[in-house]
Amino acid sequence: MTDINDVVTQSSSGDVSIAVELQPSSSTMGISGINEWRHRLQVKVTSPALKGAANQDLINLMSDFFGLPNSSVKLDSGAKDRRKRILLSDISLKLVIEKLEQYLANQYGSREGE
C-alpha cells in the first residue's frame, strides 16, 4: 500500500502539498482513497470539469475537510488535468497526515488484509 508520505509533502514555501487524482462528474463527493500506482489522493466531486467548477468543488471539499478557510487552499498545478497538486497553508504537515490517516482508516480500514 502507498504510504501517505508519498502523497502529502511539505513544499519549499512551507505549505503542505497534496497530490490529488480528481474524478469530476461523480455521483458522490468526497475522498475515496489513495491511488497506489500514481501515489495520489483520490477525490470525487459532483461538478463537471467545466469552467473550473470541479476545481472549485475540490477547494471547497479540502477546506471543509481540514477546517480551513478557502483562502488557505490553493490549486498549485493541474488546473486542466485530473492529476492536481493542492497547497494548504495555516496547517501543519503532521496534522494533515493525521487527519487523512484517521479518515482513511475509518472509511477503508475494514478492507485491509483482504
Image (cartoon, helix red, strand yellow):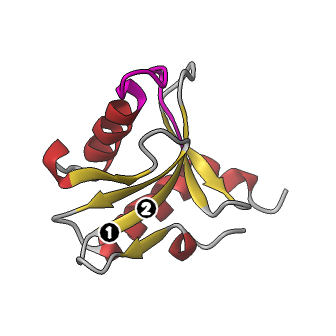
Q: Secondary structure at mark 2?
A: strand
Look at label 2 and name its amino acid. Ile
- Cβ–Cβ under 8 Å for marks 2 and 1: yes
Instruction: Give the spatial CA distance, label 2 vs label 1.
Output: 7 Å
Q: Circle 1: is it few (<14), some (14-19), or many (20+) Cα within 10 Å?
A: many
Question: Depth check: 24 or 65 in front?
Answer: 24
- Taking the spot 38% from the left edge, 35% from the top edge, the residue there is 55
Q: Position of residue 18 (x, y in %)?
A: 43, 61
Q: Position of residue 103 (x, y in %)?
A: 47, 53
Question: Depth check: 51 or 89 in front?
Answer: 51
Residue at the extreme bottom = 12
Quadrant (top left, top right, bottom left, bottom right) of the N terminus: bottom right
* Direction from residue 50 to residue 95 in the image, left or right: left
Give the magenta part as a residue range: 43-54
Q: Secondary structure at mark 1?
A: strand
- Residue labelled with disc 2: 18
* Direction from residue 28 to residue 17 in the image, left or right: left
Residue at the extreme right = 114
Q: Is residue 91 above or below residue 28?
A: below
Look at label 1 and name its amino acid. Val
**Main SS, magenta residues:** loop
Please tell me whether residue 45 belongs to the stretch shown in magenta: yes
- Taking the spot 36% from the left edge, 29% from the top edge, the residue there is 52
- Taking the spot 67% from the left edge, 60% from the top edge, the residue there is 38
Give residue 16's mark: 1
